[in-house]
Image: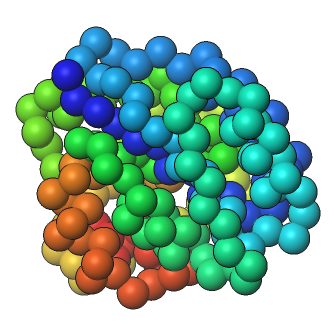
Amino acid sequence: MKSISFIIPCYNEEKRLAKTFKALEGVVLPRGLMLEQIIFVDDGSCDKTFEKINNYAQNMTLPIVVISYKNNRGKGYAIRQGMFESESDYTLFFDADISTPLAEIKKFAPHVQNNVPVIIGTRKNGKSTVIKHQPIYRELLGKIFTQITRIFLQVNVSDFTCGFKAFSKNAIDDIFPKTKINGWGYDAEIL
């Protein structure tokens, strides 16, 4: 049995959190995985994100940790703080809007059992269904970013910016203390 924690970085997510909470309450982990903790990182929100997360945490039996700080530092910073808090065998981060359904964890389970240190979700494998597309300019910029990053980093990753990635405890200890990028581009740096 391997333990897993979830990290959910949040910045002004009060309108999306109901969907997040519903997804968390309905998550079914594959055999061999046990949820150790859910780590919400409030990245300096100026709406009611922190209040909603705290209310949710107080009313749940799920093991919830809330990290919050006053000033917005960026998603890379928020994820790094969550990774440092996690004590699980694996830690998965995903976006509060649940753009990747939590049921997709089942695809990660065999890799966790095989001790793969970094597991990356992708929307660009020919098997994914994107229900709500980003504006065309963002999709185009994403394709350009992916190609340039693959060339410069010599890393064969099809989707650097998919917000559904899991790391083993050893990978966290090796990677995240070295990261510096707090905002856009953090994905490429950690990979």
User: Could you say which quadrant of the image residue 97 lies in?
Assistant: top right
Q: Residue at x 19, y 59 (%)?
A: 171
Question: Looking at the image, which is closer to me, 117 or 122?
Answer: 117
Residue 145, can we see it?
no
The residue furthest bottom is 180
The number of callouts visible is 0
Residue 4, can we see it?
yes
Residue 5 in the image: state x and y as whole percent: 41, 41
Asked whether, in this view, residue 11 is left or right of residue 138, the answer is: right
Asked whether, in this view, residue 79 is left or right of residue 67, the answer is: left
Asked whether, in this view, residue 148 is left or right of residue 155, the answer is: right
Vertical placement of residue 139 versus 153, above or below? above
Vertical placement of residue 78 versus 91, above or below? below
Vertical placement of residue 132 versus 12, above or below? above
Question: Looking at the image, which is closer to me, 68 or 156?
Answer: 68
Residue 60 in the image: state x and y as whole percent: 68, 27
Quarter of the picture holding the C terminus: bottom left
Question: Looking at the image, which is closer to me, 99 or 46?
Answer: 46
Q: Residue at x 44, y 75 (%)?
A: 186
Q: Residue at x 68, y 74 (%)?
A: 69
Residue 135 in the image: state x and y as whole percent: 73, 58
